[in-house]
Amino acid sequence: MKKGYKQLVDEASAEIKTYSVAEALAKMHDPQVQFIDVRDVRELEREGVVPGAFHAPRGMIEFWVDPESPYYKPVFGERKEFILFCGAGWRSALTTKTVQDMGLENVAHIEGGFGAWKAAGAPVVEKEKK
């Protein structure tokens, strides 16, 4: 193995903006901020969701961010700050670095991810059933 996940996460973290849960929570009601949840849908169903967060699974993020992709999601064309999170902060660090490299501006992620968010008593709601 040339690079393990820890090295990849550390390298990404050195090049992205990271917010603590408290810093992210302070931005929660800012209309110029969009929270992006990159967890798997099963995690959302099992653990709950951050109110107002947009679900963009990590496996689709490159396609949803790129305006030239047939899977593009207009939310990523809005002039907002995007704050990404996953379960523990590892996937969101890698994803934040990826979308930053793609040219998405004003991106950050939450240190410790949804686990830290929930542990801090920040707002969580049950995922809506379809």
Image (tube, helix red, strand yellow):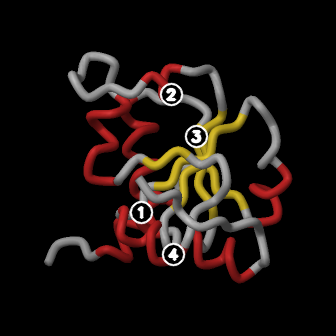
For mark 1, what is the residue?
A: 39
Quadrant location, the N terminus: bottom left
Mark 2 residue type = Val
Residue for point 62% across, 20% down: 79
Q: Nearer the viewer, mark 1 or mark 3?
A: 1
Q: Nearer the viewer, mark 4 or mark 1?
A: 1
Find numbered disc 1 in the image and state the secondary structure of the residue it sits on. Answer: loop
For mark 3, what is the residue?
A: 107
Residue for point 46% across, 77% down: 46
Q: CA distance from mark 2 to mark 1?
A: 17 Å
Q: Quadrant of residue 3?
A: bottom left
Find numbered disc 2 in the image and state the secondary structure of the residue it sits on. Answer: helix
Residue for point 68% across, 71% down: 117
Residue, far front: 130
Mark 3 residue type = Val
**Which is more N-terminal, label 3 or label 4?**
4
Residues tagged 1 and 3 counted as in contact (Cβ below 8 A) = no
Q: Is residue 94 above or below residue 6?
A: above
Q: CA distance from mark 4 to mark 3?
A: 17 Å
**Which is more N-terminal, label 1 or label 2?**
1
**Which is more N-terminal, label 2 or label 4?**
2
**Which is more N-terminal, label 2 or label 3?**
2
For residue 75, which numbered disc appears in the image?
Answer: 2
Residues tagged 4 and 3 counted as in contact (Cβ below 8 A) = no
**Which is more N-terminal, label 1 or label 4?**
1
For residue 88, which numbered disc appears in the image?
Answer: 4
Q: Nearer the viewer, mark 4 or mark 3?
A: 4
Viewer-side residue, 9 vs 77: 77
Would you call the spot at circle 4 few (<14 residues within 10 Å), some (14-19), or many (20 or more)?
some
